Image (spheres, helix red, strand yellow):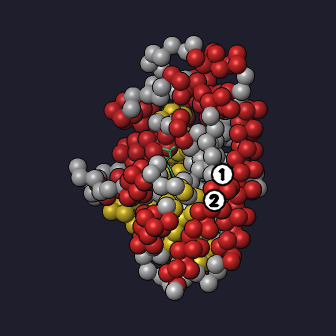
Amino acid sequence: MRIEPFELERWQSVWENKVELNISESGVQPLTTAELVGDEAALQRILEVPLGYPQTNGSEELRRRIADFYPGARTENVLVTCGASEANYVSTWALLDLGDEVVLMLPNYMQIRGTANSMGVTVKPLWLRENLSWGIDVDELARLVTVKTKLIAICNPNNPTGATLSPDHCDAIVRVAAKVGAWILADEVYRGAEFDGKTTPSFWGTYERVLCTGGFSKAFALPGLRTGWVVGPPAMVERLWGYHDYTSIGPTMLTDRLAAFALEPKRREWVLSRTRSILNRNYPVLRDWLAAHANVFSHVLPRAGAIGWAGLRVGGNSAAMAEELRTKKGVLLVPGEYLGMKSYVRFGFGGHVEHLQKALERVAEWLDESAR
Ligand SMILES: Cc1ncc(COP(=O)(O)O)c(C=O)c1O
């Protein structure tokens, strides 16, 4: 099997710790273990956890707390994974075979496209449309889905647009999937990071062939836990566990404990409200900056996530711009090509606000200099 480079991950992992101003992240300022755990006694209990092998599909307690996030789900519906990435990977690996077709929402985090391409699966893009506030065209969806469609893969809330699907669009996806018996893989890793605190409805419970992936990296501000999950019908979750035996075996003892801690009901609310306050404090800085540069960028207000997606009005490929910003201004943002649309850029606004302001000032300087 030949894999294609995962450009976004390479771009970030090579440069994010080398640049002065990193605004390529899609999450908020991460929590420390001490902030998460809070009191000394609880911290001490964490330190005393023996570092043996954990329950490899996730402890009962952690799976119960994850299930609480999905109406009607139970522990047998949950497999704990190493990030949403592993959840997406084992799901794609288990569901797809050479010659299948997958209908993939784009723009998107490109993991499923890369995995499907490496498996010899045909990827048919379902484009989000800027003129529909980054919604889908339901007629186009109906045309794309055929008897060969094994999977419809969506990301809701979406990375990079920050848009969420309307209830009508969710219904349309379920309807066309059911018509041909396709699975829906809903990557919901940004669920819980809505600006207005109204949690995006999950695809869970809408249809019997649904897998929902999620994790702690975005709304929960804990990307370093490397913990995620997939929620699905018990027989499929059992099957995915078999794939997970080959990928990571299980979470670590510490991450399982810390993740269960983060999902204690009161703590979960505290973590999510912290994320919301960062989003609501920082987004206006980016929004006003983009409004001041509306001659250069188009922008549709996001609903969730610490990411602003902006289109270059002149068109072209933003990769050269991103490279110049990195080398000349020490600013790392994400060229849209790495998310499926080359004339766009993604600004991450979830870090320290002063850092964001400084990075945007540098981008403005670069724009001025290149206009001269
Ligand atoms: C849509 C989407 N899915 C999955 C991931 C990977 O998440 P994790 O850190 O939980 O592996 C990302 C990371 O940016 C993402 O944006």
Indicate whether 299 appears above or below 212: below
Residue 356 numbered tag: 2
Indicate whether 67 appears above or below 334: above
Q: Quadrant of residue 319?
A: bottom left
**Residue 165 location, x and y as percent?**
63, 62
Instruction: Name the element at disc 2.
Output: helix
CB of mark 1 near ligand 1 (< 8 Å): no
- The residues tagged by marks 2 and 1 sit, at their Cα atoms, a distance apart of 6 Å
Q: Quadrant of residue 53?
A: top left
Residue drawn at (46%, 67%) of the image: 328
Residue drawn at (50%, 43%) of the image: 84
Residue drawn at (70%, 58%) of the image: 282
Residue nearer the viewer, 285 or 204: 285
Q: Is residue 166 visible?
A: no
Indicate whether 315 appears above or below 17: below
Residue at the disc numbered 1: 352
**Residue 265 location, x and y as percent?**
74, 32
Look at label 1 and name its amino acid: His
**Residue 26 location, x and y as percent?**
56, 54
Judged from this view, the residue extending furthest toward the left is: 1
Residue nearer the viewer, 369 or 225: 369
Determine whether, in the image, residue 103 is placed left or right of residue 294: left
Residue nearer the viewer, 336 or 81: 336
Look at label 2 and name its amino acid: Leu
